[in-house]
Amino acid sequence: MEIGPRQEILLPVRPGFIVFSLVISYLLNLIPVEGLLKSAMPDFLAMTLLYWCIHQPQRVGIGTSWVLGILMDVANASIFGEHALAYSLMAYLALLLRRRVSMLKIDHQFTHVMLLLFIMQSVMLLTGLAAKNIFPGWTQFLGSLTAGLLWPVLTRLLKLPQRPKADPTRI
Amino acid sequence: MEQELFSHGPSPAARLTFFTLLSLLFLISDAHYRYLDVLRIGIETATYPLQRLVMAPVDLARGVGSYLHAQNSLVGENVILKQQILENRAELLRMESLRRENDHLRRLFESAKKIRNPAVMAEIIYGARDPFSRKVIVDKGSFSHVREGSAVIDDSGLIGQVLRAYPWASEVSLITDKDHPTPVEVMRNGLRAVVFGFGSSNLLDLRYLSTNTDIREGDVLVTSGIDGTFPQGLPVATVIKVDRNPAYTFSRILCKPIAGVDQYRQVLIMAPSAPPPPLPVETPEPVNKGKK
């Protein structure tokens, strides 16, 4: 596998954009879907959090993930703490793995992302099993697969505002 | 980089420990006690505009879809609906006479008059994504006089119960939710029982009936009303399978909900009936209130 991405010089990210992207992904998570599509829908908020944990660890970390997890718990009518616990653990692992992930090319990063999301979903599964004693089935892990496939798209989208504008006067 | 990260407050491991403990605290207090409902109501109310924002395109798509509905399907539907209205009217007339007769009889018995419950029409905003529960969020809340515990029905029968009422929305736990108890009686012989949701499938489980109980496939279960939460006589489910295995104390009875538990968007929320008289100190029958 090729290592070493094309080094890019990016503009500093605006905090407003981070908030904006998190709000949008939260909204995407609220879209009502049914059936198999419901389990195949990626957790957009988790993906966006993961992106910012990897690229902006001083701004978005475990605390932000926990708070957004609480918001997701309310929106999904699940027990308080189910998403929060899973998101904060995912954020921690992302902080540990972030240098490794950012060394990889964008198209090669999805394996790590999928793994982190799998761990996140397993934590949620375990808390659900412990609290309610229901096994919701394996199909819900499809969400992590689609999330992994969408990761390159998401990364490029979130990097867009950081790209310097082409300046014809510069060499 | 390492230095920079750690110069900002506690280490990631310390943060993780803190937030994990906080999550566990929240999990336990929410699963066993309902201390955090105030927080939940606050967050739900604050994020309600966002939920409506997401629903706007979905509603628009639905609106356009129904506008483009083919003419002949509408005509066909109209014919069927007209027929249904006629049938319903006949039924209604009979109901009216029965109600009058019933009122009369009740007056004769000098018993309390049955209060006709006011109902609120609501629309399902979305089904919760949580794979562990069968809940839906509807667009009427405590501002529309929806209260916790109200029965939620569609045009054919009971679909669930209001679990939490927020100002503009409420959380409805469906009867198919795991271990959601609904007190019912068999319409044919008045046998009382409690039906529970399975959680995973769209079926119900009629528990604690011994193998020699008089129950058959095809029996209709209606709410018994003895819990004081659900009004009496709402259709709940039909028995589809009775498995009498003498090796077990109880028979295994599967039921199918009559209402389209996860089909329709419009639902009716009925106000809870008058509170029941206090239970005697020791009740031999395990009557569950239907709330967690």
Image: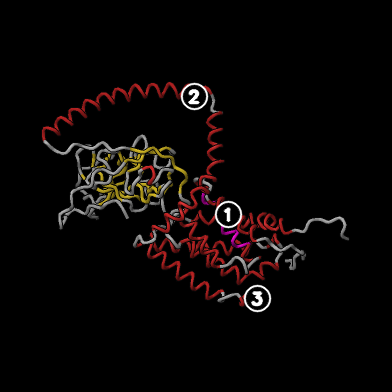
Q: Quadrant of the N terminus of chain B?
A: bottom right
List x then y, in percent, for residue A115.
58, 64
Closer to the camera in the image, A40 or B147: B147
Q: Which mark is residue B74?
A: 2
Q: Which mark is residue B4?
A: 3
Tell me the distance, in whole angstroms, between the alpha carbons under discs 1 and 3.
28 Å
Tell me the distance, in whole angstroms, between the alpha carbons under discs 2 and 3.
67 Å
Q: Which residue is mark 1?
A: A23
Neighbour class for label 2 at 10 Å: few (<14), some, many (≥20)? few
Looking at the rendered structure, the secondary structure element under dot 2 is helix
| Identity of the residue drawn at 54% across and 67% down | A63
Amino acid under disc 3: Glu
List x then y, in percent, for residue A145.
59, 56
List x then y, in percent, for residue B66.
52, 31
Closer to the camera in the image, A135 or A21: A21
List x then y, in percent, for residue A153.
67, 54
